[in-house]
């Protein structure tokens, strides 16, 4: 069964169970500074899992594009990818464990025809934060799964979320297909990673909210969040040993083999081919996203740069010396443009950025080689020097070691690891300081700033006399708002002052903030702004502030502009080509 058919069957199955189909959200989380990318289908739905009503109701289903950077070092094994598609269905305070498990079992065994004898499951074993999930275990037993194929596992295995530092989370039950290969040991069990048990589905029972202090509180409503990895499930259905053997990867892999002139790769070459395949998909989807991320040394741009440069390095190891990622990206676009029309729409941008980054990196690579030659005159490479080559010139340790071996000198690997750990710790601390708030944060400060972005958006259109200005990204913490918008030059001081004055004028008017539920067509007829309307489905929430601002939005809002206080712009700068960024606060 091909991936296209699997998607269709999944959506139709849950549509029959009274779920509304919603579209995939952006890979760049809207208003959420706690994570860089959308990591799961539930991520864009956090406000609704917290209790805010969804315009499509309380049963939803979709296919969400996701990126998980935590899996980057595992890419190339039988099941791990950084970019993947997630099939998901949700209950927002409606059904719970019984129905979720019933339907998971029905879809796997009746629709997809997996043999029930090949199915093993895991459930949460319980700890100080939540009890042992005997209810799920008993439900599985009632469906015919014997006790010996039901495993109680701890939080690191059977607890999902939150997507960021805080937010909805809870125990889960995971489903695995036995691939019939020889177990790695007598202790082999689902989740061990050797390939015998292939995870295909995860039902998360979200009844907790993790708060900033680390405690787990009960949510107002019990939710179900399920996730089925499209590529993994397709691999099992097609009888493949790895996700890289399914039909959406084959054309990319064949092109890499053609470019490298390697038809029968050895183990090391096979790993390089898989890493390039995964990373070019991830890069194409990030570049093709409507929010226009480009390679940089910060946040999403840094991850994108890492994907591209890592691909180029692995391409060189296969003997590919010319720019080749743009050719692979064209294949990715062709394979996915029907489901993700933004890829075709942004095709020129994707190709141009890949070529530009390739040119930049190859120049850096040359400089790095010269730097290595100077370092190697001491007949050894210290840990600090190896880390400098890694951080400043993009040399992985393996590449430095390979170069050193050719000239018969040693590399201080242990010293490199120490420097790398120190760097990771600094990055982690910096990230913890920076990433507060998030979609699950409905604090008074965040709610006010969320409403203030609507006024800022409208103020820019009014002051700059550009009705086609729209949001290109938003990041809100309790301390400040960050708003990206399409504009091709720096704003003058007097323009920024006029924008501030316009917003503060509306605040002083004490206007009501009114929410309505409308169809997308009705919202558009009313003149509602909204780049993200596609993710909500047929019906959307529209927020009107007096007669001054009207926007499609799913976030939390205040009742009246008088609650906002004084609005002040702190900074205006470039974010990307043709995109400006404003940081502002409420005082």
Image (cartoon, helix red, strand yellow):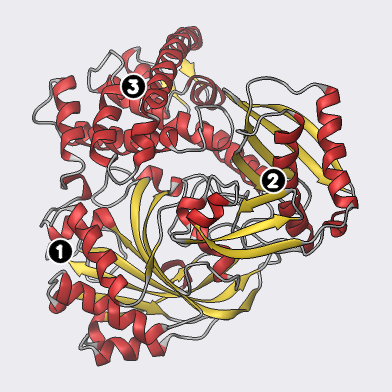
For the N terminus, which image quadrant? bottom left
Contact? badges 3 and 2 (CB < 8 Å)? no
Q: Where is residue 276, by image quadrant? A: top left
Is residue 187 visible to us here? no
Where's residue 207, x and y in %?
54, 78
Expressed as whole percent of the image width and height from the top left, the position of residue 8 reads 23, 60
Q: Earlier in the sequence, mark 3 or mark 2?
A: 3
Spatial CA distance of label 3 from label 2 is 37 Å
Which residue is tagged 1? 179
Q: Is residue 334 left or right of residue 39?
A: left
State the image coordinates of residue 260 (x, y, percent, origin top left): 18, 21
| Nearer-N-terminus badge (3/1) | 1
Report the front residue among 77 and 559.
559
Which of the labelled discs sits on residue 434, or is there none? 2
Mark 3 = which residue? 402
Q: Judge depth for marks 3 and 1 and give the one in front.
A: 1
Choose between 80 and 189: the one closer to the eye: 80
264 is higher (above) or lower (below) than 339: above
- First in sequence, mark 2 or 1: give its number: 1
- The residue shown at (59%, 59%) is 554
Task: State left or right for residue 75 relative to residue 533.
Answer: left
Which residue occupies the foreground of this view, 155 or 377? 155
Q: Position of residue 232 (x, y in %)?
A: 25, 56
Which of label 3 and label 2 is nearer to you? 2
| Element on which disc 3 rests | helix
Determine whether the residue tagged by mark 2 lies in a helix, strand or loop: helix
Could you classify mark 1 by the number of other residues whose Cα lies within 10 Å: few (under 14), some (14-19), or many (20 or more)?
A: some
Distance in Å between CA atoms under marks 3 and 1: 37 Å
Checking the image for residue 479, the label placed there is: none
211, above or below 425, in the image: below
Q: CA distance from mark 2 to mark 1?
A: 43 Å
Residue 489 lies in quadrant:
top right
């Amino acid at each position: 069964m091909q991936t296209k058919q699997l998607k269709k069957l999944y959506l139709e199955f849950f549509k029959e169970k009274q779920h509304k189909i919603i579209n995939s959200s952006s890979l760049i989380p809207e208003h959420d500074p706690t994570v860089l990318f959308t990591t799961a289908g539930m991520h864009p739905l956090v406000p609704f899992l917290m209790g805010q009503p969804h315009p499509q109701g309380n049963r939803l289903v979709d296919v969400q594009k996701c990126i998980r950077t935590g899996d980057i070092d595992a890419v190339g094994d039988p099941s791990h990818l950084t970019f993947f598609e997630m099939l998901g269905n949700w209950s927002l305070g409606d059904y719970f464990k019984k129905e979720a498990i019933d339907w998971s079992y029905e879809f796997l065994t009746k629709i997809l025809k997996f043999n029930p004898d090949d199915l093993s499951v895991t459930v949460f074993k319980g700890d100080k934060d939540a009890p042992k999930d005997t209810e799920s275990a008993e439900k599985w037993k009632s469906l015919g799964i014997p006790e010996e194929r039901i495993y109680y596992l701890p939080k690191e295995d059977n607890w999902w979320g939150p997507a960021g530092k805080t937010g909805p989370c809870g125990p889960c039950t995971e489903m695995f297909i036995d691939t019939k290969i020889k177990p790695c040991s007598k202790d082999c069990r689902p989740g061990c990673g050797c390939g015998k048990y292939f995870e295909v589905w995860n039902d998360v029972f979200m009844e907790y909210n993790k708060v900033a202090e680390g405690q787990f509180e009960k949510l107002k409503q019990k939710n179900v969040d399920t996730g089925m990895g499209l590529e993994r499930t397709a691999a099992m259905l097609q009888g493949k040993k790895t996700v890289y053997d399914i039909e959406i990867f084959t054309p990319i892999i064949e092109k890499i083999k053609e470019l490298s002139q390697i038809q029968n790769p050895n183990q090391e070459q096979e790993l390089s081919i898989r890493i390039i395949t995964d990373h070019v998909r991830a890069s194409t989807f990030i570049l093709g996203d409507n929010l226009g991320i480009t390679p940089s040394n910060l946040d999403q741009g840094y991850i994108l740069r890492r994907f591209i440069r890592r691909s180029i390095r692995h391409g060189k190891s296969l003997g590919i010396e010319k720019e080749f990622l743009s050719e692979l990206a064209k294949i990715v676009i062709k394979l996915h443009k029907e489901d993700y029309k933004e890829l075709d729409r942004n095709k020129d941008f994707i190709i141009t950025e890949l070529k530009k980054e390739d040119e930049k990196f190859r120049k850096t690579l040359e400089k790095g080689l010269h730097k290595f030659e100077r370092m190697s005159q001491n007949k050894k490479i210290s840990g600090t020097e190896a880390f400098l080559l890694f951080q400043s010139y993009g040399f992985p340790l393996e590449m430095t070691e390979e170069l050193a071996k050719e000239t018969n000198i040693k590399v201080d690997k242990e010293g490199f690891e120490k420097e790398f750990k120190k760097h990771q710790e600094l990055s982690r601390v910096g990230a913890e300081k920076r990433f507060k708030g998030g979609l699950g944060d409905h604090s008074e400060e965040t709610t006010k700033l969320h409403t203030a972005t609507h006024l800022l958006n409208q103020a820019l259109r009014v002051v700059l006399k550009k009705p086609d200005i729209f949001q290109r990204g938003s990041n809100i913490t309790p301390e400040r708002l960050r708003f990206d918008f399409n504009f091709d030059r720096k704003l003058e001081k007097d323009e920024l002052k006029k924008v501030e004055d316009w917003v503060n004028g509306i605040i002083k008017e004490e206007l009501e903030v009114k929410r309505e539920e409308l169809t997308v067509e009705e919202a558009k007829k009313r003149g509602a702004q909204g780049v993200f309307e596609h993710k909500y489905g047929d019906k959307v929430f529209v927020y009107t502030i007096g007669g001054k601002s009207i926007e499609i939005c799913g976030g939390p809002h205040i009742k009246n502009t008088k609650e906002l206080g004084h609005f002040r712009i702190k900074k205006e700068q470039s974010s990307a080509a043709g995109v400006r960024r404003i940081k502002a606060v409420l005082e």
